[in-house]
Image (cartoon, grey):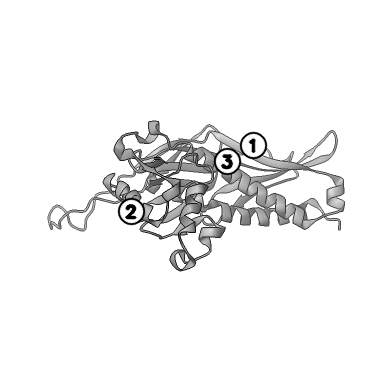
Amino acid sequence: MATNIDTACEIYSQRFLKGLVRALPRLRVFSNSFTDEAKEVGEVIRVPLVSADTVAAWNATSNNFQRTAASLVDVKVDLNTRLIAGFGITSEQMVNFRPNWWEGKAERNAKAICDSMIAAFVALVTPANYGDTAADKLGVKLASFNRKAMGPIRSAAVAKKLVPEECALCLNPDFYSALLNDLDALIYGGREAIVGGVIPGLLGFANIVEVPQLTIPGFVCHPDAIAVATRKIALADTSVYKLVTEVTEPETGLTMTEVVYPHGPDGSLNHSVNAAYGASVGNSAALVRLVDA
């Protein structure tokens, strides 16, 4: 059936948003600043790092309900990368419109963009950024990686003064699969582990997360270990485009810009989704790497 580009893009946007919702749980384990504020690539974003306040004994004179203003700790993140994924649109594709094709492209493009972001974020997890002493890493073996392996990981986190209940345990697919193979539905309790690659509140960790982009076995960290930011891309003049719209993931606020560009000389239409992001080391003491033993 024939359709117009506005209808096609509406179908694409809705499915792209669903793809974002599924792809983004891995990003929520880091300190993030995702808004629909427009910024230029190359600008600096300040991402707040959240940590607990000091606990002290009550003192009616010096330590009462009148508190000093919170000291905001943040890290500067360079908005230094712009990603784009898209495709040309032929006249035949508009005349012989197939919604499932547009939906499939949307889901795959959403995943591809998020995968590229996550790869850049976890690439920060190196000895240079987070230390290489005995306290900064723990050796693990894939052959024996199961529920019992969680005890030493938890102990290593505690030894580095992390709070496991506030930590994400991020694992590459081999180690995540090995752990999942040792669990059953009565333990992990829901479909998140298989469908979303995230097991919330299991074995003493806030989340256990599968991260396909990891080249090491994994890491355990507080949210403030890595700071990430995205912003809406600033377009000075949208009159040259047939369509410009923002797609915003509702839980995180991450916004990407959808653009349909008509190329004047040949009259072709071109559809793209693009995003601007950056990442930086946050609290370098808030992460323990898992390495091959």
Q: Is residue 277 above or below residue 9?
A: above
Q: Please, what secondary structure does the residue beneath circle 2 have? A: helix
Depth check: give the residue in front, 76 or 243: 76
How many numbered discs sit on the rendered protein? 3
Mark 1 closeness class: few <14, some 14–19, many ≥20 residues within 10 Å: few
Provide residue 40's location: percent of width, then percent of height: 56, 35
Q: Amino acid at mark 1?
A: Ala
Residue 64 seen anywhere in this rendered image of the structure:
yes
* Residue 4 numbered mark, or none: none
Q: Residue reaching furthest bottom? A: 186
Provide residue 52's location: percent of width, then percent of height: 30, 51
- Residue linked to disc 2: 151
Q: Amino acid at mark 2?
A: Gly
**Mark-to-mark CA distance, 1 and 3:** 26 Å
38 relative position to 73: left or right: right
Depth check: give the residue in front, 168 or 217: 217
In the rendered image, which quarter is residue 160 located in?
Answer: top left
Q: Residue shown at 66%/47% (left/top)?
A: 109
Depth check: give the residue in front, 293 or 112: 293
* Residue 116 numbered mark, or none: 3
In the rendered image, which quarter is residue 231 located in?
Answer: top right
- Residue linked to disc 1: 236
* Marks 1, 2: nearer the viewer: 2
Q: Please, what secondary structure does the residue beneath circle 3 have? A: helix
Provide residue 147's location: percent of width, then percent of height: 40, 57
Q: Residue shown at 71%/55% (left/top)?
A: 103
Marks 3 & 2, CB-CB < 8 Å contact = no
Q: Amino acid at mark 3?
A: Ser
